Image: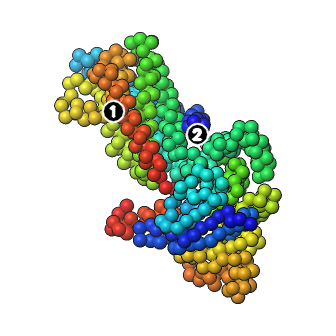
Amino acid sequence: MANIIDVKNLTKKFGDFEAVKDVSFSIEEGDIFAFLGPNGAGKSTTIKMLTTLLHPTTGEILINGFNPVTHSDAARHSFGIVFQDPSLDEDLTALENLKLHGVLYHVPAETLKKRIDELLTLVELSDRRNDFVRDFSGGMKRRLEIARGLLHHPKIIFLDEPTLGLDPQTRNHLWRYVQKLNADEGITVFFTTHYMEEAEHIAKHIAVIDNGTIVAQGTNEELQKQTGAATLEEAFLKLTGSAIRDDVGNSTDQMRNHYRMRHGGRR
Amino acid sequence: MQTIYIMWLREVKRFIRSKSRIVGALGQPLLFLIALGYGLGPVFAKAGQGNYLQFIAPGIIGMSIIFTAIFNGMQVIWDRQFGFLKETMVAPVSRLSIMFGRTLGGATVSTAQGTLVLILATLAGFRPVSSIGIFPAILAMLLIALLFSALGIMVASLLKDMQGFQLIMNFLVMPLFFLSGALFPLNNVPAALLIVARFDPLSYGVDALRYFLIGTANFPLILDFSVLAAVTAIFLGLGSYFFSQIEV
């Protein structure tokens, strides 16, 4: 099958700091791909480059055949994203959040209504459609964000730590939707997580990134065989070491740290 | 076009729903009108300048517009912190249309707030010179609102978090308001202050409001509108540029 995501020699520098170093990978259409790595390994920076939020320093990306730098709008139509932190407008209702998304993605009005009904049913929020998002629990917000990310029929859905802070019930539910979508609609799933058992059970392919470089990739079995580990968690720890990482935070924080270093500790 | 509309609609909906914010934002203008209007009124009258309440009401309307518009623009920072900004940044629409929609929305709600203050001022004893003058006055309000909404978004695009908020309040919004001639006539002030006031776009906005609401003005009306339109165009341009440079 054709590759829906192609990444070649991708590098991102913030000043002298190389957050992502010469990363290459490709993902086939219909895959469920887990992107794993300790905090500050370069996961978020990579996702931001894939989703047009950051420009690569060097290297090439193709999302559904489109370069996110030169054809950003075509690339943006191709994917939906659930960010690590919620990105809903809490002062609008669930329905209004979805409608706004539909307009931003040019979903025709007649299909929009049908699609919203469909997705709200899928994420079991139909009866809460007119409630304000600020009254939703963390799990409900996540579900609504997934519905929103799928609204424009994307070919790829990016899920950046989608289960962070959710209870096991909601997590199971969420992964069941994702697997169902992957099976029914053939949507490619790209996700990050710190829960190794999720990657083990859900992902068809896994890449492990550390210090900005991909240290291993393959199926769960391949990674375990390669490292002689019995579980993915063990394989992950063997690949990335067991030292605790300082979370350098997001790219803005990185830039800010960098700035502070250069300018003698002032902000 | 649709993007501009939906972003405009978002601002308007949020405004209508935040009843406490609307009422809260009326408190300060009311205090200014009553405390200054009636408190300084006798002194102002003795100085031969006429009715002070009549004089400051247009200035207070200008104040409420600049505050609402800049606060509204600063919403970009909240959206950055609460994540919603990212949703608009990955959407396949131009950032220009997002910025325009937000600016128009901010201008609409600020004009609404300004109109509410006008009603409030009338209740407090303010009498517009003619009822027909109210319509061009609202047009002037819209222009002031547009100008400062664009400025608010521009400033917010350059800030990472709310820590710079005090800085903006004390070194941008307050000086713009206090040095604009909203509270005092510009015809007898020291030359230095007049020069400063002439560089403050709010001076021209308040001047246009005075022209329509109380029939006196310091600058020619054509100058007021030219300056407001030109500065609005500049801020819209700069605002769109800085907004398009935001990295989330």
Marks 1 and 2, the one that precedes in the sequence = 2
Res B134 → quadrant: top left
**Are discs 1 and 2 less than 8 Å apart at CB?**
no
Q: Position of residue B22 (x, y in %)?
A: 52, 33
- For the point 45% across and 22% down, which residue is it? B138
Q: Residues within 10 Å of mark 1 (few under 14, many from 20)?
A: many
Quarter occupied by the N terminus of chain B: top right
From this viewpoint, is residue A103 visible? yes
Name the one closer to the observer, A35 or B108.
A35
The answer to whether marks 1 and 2 sit on the same chain is yes
Q: Which mark is residue A144?
A: none
Name the chain letter of the residue that bears numbered label 2.
B
Relative to B203, does residue A53 appear above or below in the rendering?
below
SS for dot 1: helix
B54 w.r.t. A179: above or below: above
Q: Farthest left residue?
A: B191
- Residue A237 falls left or right of residue A54: right
What color scheme is it? rainbow
Query: Left or right: where does residue B148 sit relative to residue B84?
Result: left
Single out the mark in the foreground, 1 or 2: 2
Residue drawn at x 62%, y 44% is A104
Q: Which residue is mark 1?
A: B201
Q: Rounded to the nearest whole Å, what is the CA distance between mark 1 and mark 2?
A: 29 Å
The part of the image, by quadrant, that contains residue A239 is bottom right
Q: Amino acid at mark 1?
A: Pro
Q: Is residue A177 visible?
A: no
Vertical placement of residue B6 versus A245, above or below: above
Residue B3, which numbered label?
2
Residue drawn at x 48%, y 24% is B115
Q: Secondary structure at mark 2?
A: helix
